[in-house]
Image (tube, grey):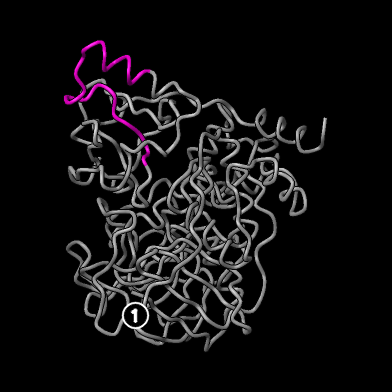
Amino acid sequence: MTFVSRTRLALISAVSVLAFATAAEAQDSFGRLPPNSVLVTPQGEILDYIPENGDVQMMRDRRGRTVLVDSWGNVVATVMGSGRERNDTRRRERNHDVYTNPDYGYSDPAFTDQGYTRQGEITGSVPDYRDVSPGNVDRQELPTSLPMQDENDMAALPPEDNAPSRQTLPSAARITKKSSAEITALQVFLDREGFSPGVIDGKTGSNVTKAIEAWQQATGETLDPNNTDDILERLRFTGGLPITTYTITAADAAGPYVASIPEDYAHKAVLPHLSFTSTVEMLGEKFHMDEAYLRELNPGIDFTIPGTIIKVINPGEPKSGKVTRIVADKYRKQVFAYDEAGTLIAAYPATIGSSDTPSPSGTVQVDRIALNPGYTYNPKINFKQGENDKVLTLQPGPNGPVGTVWIALSKPTYGIHGTPEPSKIGKTQSHGCVRLTNWDATELAKMVSVGTTVEFLD
């Protein structure tokens, strides 16, 4: 047995089998799905998760079936049991053949772009903050960037008259039937290369697709996301298997932690710090993981007990280099980092502005960089949050409005920063800033310097 075959078996055995989920088990997050409907992927599997609000759209294909389509035009799932899907034996047999055929892919003409009928959007290692002193930053200029629900994953902002033309990157191959473990390996490879897929959760999505395209643009190679053996071989040279073990330490269990993070800024301001709320949240950020995925890898584990050995992602070493130019692509919801020679060395999924509070256009510069910054809310400078009409000082912490990093830009009140909700990066909108995961923002902050140019593409 070859090394790759052995490692592939080890990879698959390292991940627990995820339970199936039906749409009926969700808290009716879609609002338009029939009762007891089941989401079936194009590969014939029952979808093992419910897509988040704004991630997909509900459409009809040419056969009259209800399908969920992501913002890249990929069919995520077909809704079984919908009102348009009659119960006659012939149709049920035809659909059974389609959904159980292991060779079924995306070539079915019923799933071409012209075959869709829109039904409307479905609604339905960071720095240890205990060891870092707050940055010296004029915090009254900091805006918030809290996620806003029910936004399209790849919604383009309105173009402006002088907007630069959009980037064209090599298209990524569509990912076919792959296990959660194999998708994890792909995500870890991209993360190690500096082309972040966002939170690592063992699932495909637009952030993974964008990361592949950016990697291809930077390397000139074509990555086959379906060739797990090739991906595992690449991982072998960059730190080994994507999943490793970690022993929870006494410091991990001790915190400090807070019971919860309130929404109201006045309530936030009375907290001594805006730290993590649990060991699971802290470990998720430390290992670039979705919290739910961390729990799935470690069923029944008490993460508060020192000495407990758990399975975690092995993200490898952070990307290094000197970034002299940043491109924030509003349409792609992605940030690109270039070195002095103009070489693309890193890319990150991002939440960039909104139609109500758009990000700047044109070119600005990095003015200052602060790790673990505090935050001063000033309603005369910032937006109006709740009923708060007075200046409020919020303490530092990963659950602060700007996370663990603030890269201030030369346009006042705008910056590149972290977030308290990494799973929503690239899938929501902000109040005008560029929001990254805390770990991506930290990696980028260590590669930029004052004067680095930041260009916004519309």
In what quadrant of the picture does the N terminus appear?
Answer: top right
Question: Looking at the image, can residue 82 be seen?
Answer: yes
Q: Is residue 410 magenta?
A: no
Q: Is residue 394 left or right of residue 24?
A: right
Q: Is residue 315 left or right of residue 5?
A: left
Q: Residue at x 62, y 35 (%)?
A: 305
- Identify whether 86 is placed above or below 251: above
Q: Whole-percent x and y of residue 28?
A: 23, 32
Q: Is residue 87 magenta?
A: yes
* Corner quadrant of residue 321: bottom right
In what quadrant of the picture does the C terminus appear?
Answer: bottom left
Q: Which residue is mark 1?
A: 413
- Identify whether 57 is placed above or below 296: below
Q: Is residue 392 left or right of residue 443?
A: left
Q: Whole-percent x and y of residue 195?
A: 57, 61
Q: Residue at x 32, y 44 (%)?
A: 112
